[in-house]
Amino acid sequence: MPSASWLRWQNERMPRLAEVDGQCAASLVLAPPLPNLVDENLRGYVLLLSAHFQGFCRDLYTESALVVASKVRPSLRLLIQAQFTAHLKLDHGNPNLQNLKADCERFGFLLNLPAVDPLNPARLTDLDHLNKWRNAAAHHATTPTGTLLSLAALRGWRNSCDGVAKSLDAIMYTELRRILKRAPWAP
Amino acid sequence: MAGRKATVPLKVGDRVKLHYYGKRGRVVELRGPLGPGGKLVYRVIVSRKPRPVYIDLTEDQVVLITPANSSVKSPQFEPRENGEHVGHAPG
C-alpha cells in the first residue's frame, strides 16, 4: 500500500539516480581515463542520492501530516499544518537516523527501523557513510575515513536508501492506520 | 478539504490567500501531489510576528491573489529559493 511519496521515489527519483549512475559508469571507461571527471561525477552522485532520499523523507512526512490534518475541522486544520511544518529537521538537515527519528516521532511513536527489517542496521550504516560523504562533497571538506568513494559503494548506498525508504513507508502506513483507525492512503 | 480548489497550478512567488486563516502568503515551494486524494501541495510563507512561518498547504486551501482581487500590499519578505538543500547544514 504505497504512499504517493513512495511512488515518486520509485517512478521518478530512482530512475533519475539510475541515469546518474549510468553517467558515472560511462566516465569510468573513458579512454584516455579522466580521473578528475570520475571523481566529480561520483561526488555529484553522492549529493544527488542524499538529496533524493531527503526529498523522499520530506515528502512522506508532509503526506502523513496532511492526512492527519485532514481529519480535523477546517478551522483547526491550518494550525495543525503549521505545527507539523515548523522546525522540521529534514528541511535543513541531512537525512540521517537522528533527524529521521526527530521528525517521524512527532507523530507520537518511536521510530525503530531495525525492528521492521533485519537488513536495516546495515542499511543505516550505509546511510551514515552516505551522509558523511555528502557533507565532504558539498563542503569540499576532508574525505571521511573508513570508506572509499566508488561506484560500487554508491550503488550499495542507493540500494540501502531504497530499503530504508520502503521501511519508512511501511512504518508510516502502520502507525497512521493505528492513529486514524483507517488506511491513511488508498492502496 | 474545504475551500475552493485552485483551477491553475500555482508558481513559486505567487501571492495567495489562506482559507480560514485570514492571512496572505507567498508560495515558496511546489511540493507536488502529496495531499489527500493527490491534491497538490504548496509550501507557503506567511508573515507573522515575531517571524514568518512556513506552512504546507493543499491546493484547495489557497486562492491565488491577482491584481483584480488584491487590496493589500505585498508581504515584506522574499520567497525562499526552491530547493531541497537550501541552507543545508552538515549533520
Image (cartoon, helix red, strand yellow):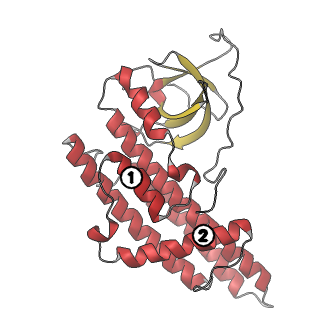
| Chain for disc number 2 | A
- Name the kind of residue labelled 2 in the image: Glu
Residue at 33 percent across and 32 percent down: it is A70
Q: Residue furthest bottom?
A: A32
Q: Is residue B37 left or right of residue A51?
A: left
Residue at 23 percent across and 41 percent down: it is A180
Give the percent coordinates (x, y) of residue B37: 36, 38
Q: Residues within 10 Å of mark 1 (few under 14, many from 20)?
A: many
Mark identifier at residue A104 = 1
Front residue of this view, candidates A32 and A183: A183
Q: Quadrant of residue A138?
A: bottom right
Q: Is residue B58 above or below residue A120?
A: above
Give the percent coordinates (x, y) of residue A115: 27, 69
Give the percent coordinates (x, y) of residue B51: 61, 30
Mark 1–mark 2 Cα distance, whole angstroms, equals: 30 Å
Q: Secondary structure at mark 2?
A: helix
Q: Is residue A77 above or below residue A15?
A: above
Q: Secondary structure at mark 1?
A: helix
Q: Is residue B78 left or right of residue B39?
A: right
Q: Residue furthest front?
A: B50
Residue at 57 percent across and 40 percent down: it is B30
| Chain for disc number 1 | A
Whether residues under marks 1 and 2 lie with C-beta atoms below 8 angstroms apart, the answer is: no
> Which image quarter holds the N terminus of chain B?
top left
Front residue of this view, candidates B59 and A115: A115
Mark identifier at residue A19 = 2
